[in-house]
Amino acid sequence: MRIHKAVLLGEAIEALNLREGSIVVDATLGSGGHSQEILKKIGSSGKLIAIDQDREAIDDFRKSTGDDLRVSVVKKNFSNLDLILDELGLNSVDAILADLGFSSDQMDDAQRGMSFQRDAVLDMRLDQEQELTAEIIVNKYSQEEIEKILRVYGEESFSRNIAKKIIEERAEKKIETTFDLVKVLDKAIPEKFKHGKIHFATKTFQALRIAVNQELEVLEKFVPMAIEKLSPEGRLAIIAFHSLEDRIVKNIFRENARGCICPPDFPKCVCENTAKIKIITRKPIVPSDLEIEENPRSRSSKLRVCKKIPVE
């Protein structure tokens, strides 16, 4: 049974400014909560392209929509948006939504090994058909590579201690499960730093998930591509869950919202640079206190929205 609650559901759907006949991309289908609401808004003449690299999510959504001719479901990474739309014969779309978070169903699935709260194999793959897993990183990568992953993707203060301890422990016994890794972290992190607001394993598990799924690299590729594929006045809405994702989205939005980039002392513009988008959310939209109370996993989410500027 799917238990995931779509985050910022009402806010995201409203931000997309959908209407009868809209062509919409849900770039991260997940458990389908956002897509189901999109279908209610676009009417009988609209079209939904639902993308995910998780086979289970794809199969579940196909069961729920049956033979709905408005829906095209595609198993690919959203960084392939241009190819997906080309294959569907679409040059542009009216709205694109990307919810970058892992669903509760994925986090709680013991077979995926994404949570430090459940003992499972160190997997962490969204796409179960890819080769790289967290277990490979932990047991095969060098100390320097592991330290960099933890420092950059997890912003982990004890990345060096942890990487060193991983190398020591795996020399004695292969680190195969989530609980194996938690035991290593317990030894590597000083006691006084293990009782904060977040669990001491949180940053390491985040870093490994990002590395396994190349989340930041695909996001950097996806956002500019999504902007290019928007129709004039089309909307792009992205929900991020940690500062690394949100920073990428914010910076790419700002870059594409800039007009002239000539030095201020130039008498006239010679760069011919024009803004591609208007940023709708100067500050990101965050969940209400009520949503956080009902769904604690929403607490770190931030929604940013932009609109495509028509070419004059």
Image (cartoon, rainbow, N blue to C red):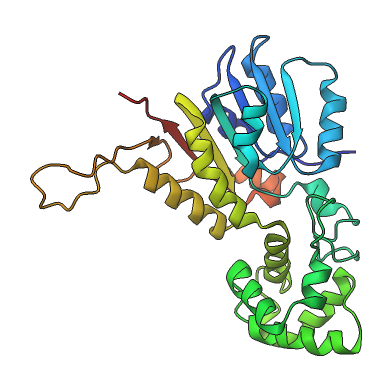
| Up-down relation of residue 114 to residue 260 (above or below) | below
Q: Quadrant of residue 110?
A: bottom right
| Up-down relation of residue 49 to residue 243 (above or below) | above
Residue 136 seen in render: yes
Nearest the eye: 140 or 200:
140
Nearest the eye: 187 or 254:
254
Residue 216: x, y in percent? 60, 56
Q: Residue furthest top?
A: 44
Residue 285 seen in render: no
| Up-down relation of residue 20 to residue 7 (above or below) | above
Q: How many marks?
A: 0
Please report the residue visible at 79 percent of the width from the left and 16 percent of the height from the top.
68
State left or right for residue 255 relative to residue 173: left
What is the quadrant of the C terminus in the image? Answer: top left
Q: Quadrant of residue 123?
A: bottom right
Please report the residue visible at 82 percent of the width from the left and 30 percent of the height from the top.
61
Residue 277: x, y in percent? 39, 35
Residue 165: x, y in percent? 76, 87
Nearest the eye: 61 or 296:
61
Residue 111: x, y in percent? 91, 56
Please report the residue visible at 85 percent of the width from the left and 84 percent of the height from the top.
170
Q: Quadrant of residue 172?
A: bottom right
Please report the residue visible at 51 percent of the width from the left and 23 percent of the height from the top.
17
What is the quadrant of the N terminus in the image? Answer: top right
State left or right for residue 62 relative to residue 295: right
